[in-house]
Amino acid sequence: MARQLDEQIAARFAVGRRLRVLDVGMGQGTQALRLARAGHQVTGLEQNAKMLAVARAALAAEPEGIRGRVRLIEGHGHETGVHFLPGSFDVVLCHGVLMYVEEPDALLAGLARVLAPGGLLSLLVRNADALAMRPGLAGDWASALAAFDTTAYTSRLGLDVRADRLATLTATLAGIGAPLHAWYGVRVFTDLAADEAPVPPDVASLLAAEERAGCTDPYRQVAALLHLCGVRG
């Protein structure tokens, strides 16, 4: 997914331009630090105090030049209007957050509000149109049948969360002034891989296959996750 994001950034902004990036629900700060290392000015927003502490520790281990490009704020994604002025950012990331938000429209509208004209909104969501794939491939036929008629599912952490449909988010993005520009599938072939699974010796081929499938129909339509890129009008 990082490569997809980099491709979208490279296509929209001049080479070498230092972008203002907001990472909403940044978790441990992996993406935020990666973009800061690339020279961008990054603000991370995270409501989980434990995650924020991990991100701060990781940031403290970075060189001074990178630390100076990152600001970390404890807060919820719904609070962007409290912390930031309209048009404050060139790129806004919201990865792995919407599944925990029961009604995401207000949050998304807030993200579009702080995005500058021509800016990029990057979303990573669970694919509601493919919820039957994981239990089906695991041989859990009852759960697979039930998944066809819902957007609710249980995460690997045992949490009851929700998924999003591509058509619904496409309409939402158009409605908030950041229409869908590109979308990809993520974890087409690897959704059943255990979190602790060792890195395979042919990992380069695996990643190449995932990237190819993630931008190719019909494979991307059954990916576990969807990466959507909207552009502020």
Image (tube, helix red, strand yellow):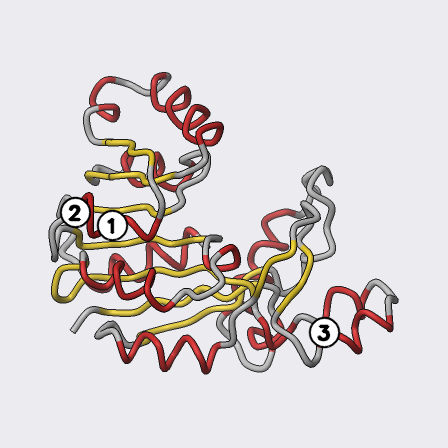
The location of residue 50, given as percent across then percent down, is: 49, 27
Secondary structure found at label 2: loop
Is residue 75 positioned above or below 228 on the image? above
- Mark carried by residue 80: 1
Task: Identify residue type, mark 2.
Answer: Phe
Instruction: Please report the residue visible at 23 percent of the width from the left and 18 percent of the height from the top.
Output: 64
Task: Identify residue type, mark 3.
Answer: Ala
The answer to whether the residues at label 1 and label 3 have Cβ atoms under 8 Å apart is no
Location of residue 229 (image quadrant): bottom left
Q: Label 2, on which residue?
A: 84
How would you rate the neighbour count of disc 2 (Cα within 10 Å): few for under 14, some for 14-19, many for 20 or more?
Answer: some
- Mark carried by residue 147: 3
Instruction: Please report the residue visible at 27 percent of the width from the left and 36 percent of the height from the top.
Output: 36
Is residue 91 positioned above or below 222 on the image? above
The answer to whether the residues at label 3 and label 2 have Cβ atoms under 8 Å apart is no
The location of residue 219, given as percent across then percent down, is: 60, 76
The answer to whether the residues at label 2 and label 1 have Cβ atoms under 8 Å apart is yes
Instruction: Please report the residue visible at 32 percent of the width from the left and 74 percent of the height from the top.
Output: 173
Label 3, label 2: how far apart the Cα atoms are: 38 Å
Query: Which callout, 1 or 3, points to the residue nearer the camera?
Result: 1
Locate the C terminus and report the quarter of the image it occupies: bottom left
The location of residue 14, given as percent across then percent down, is: 13, 56
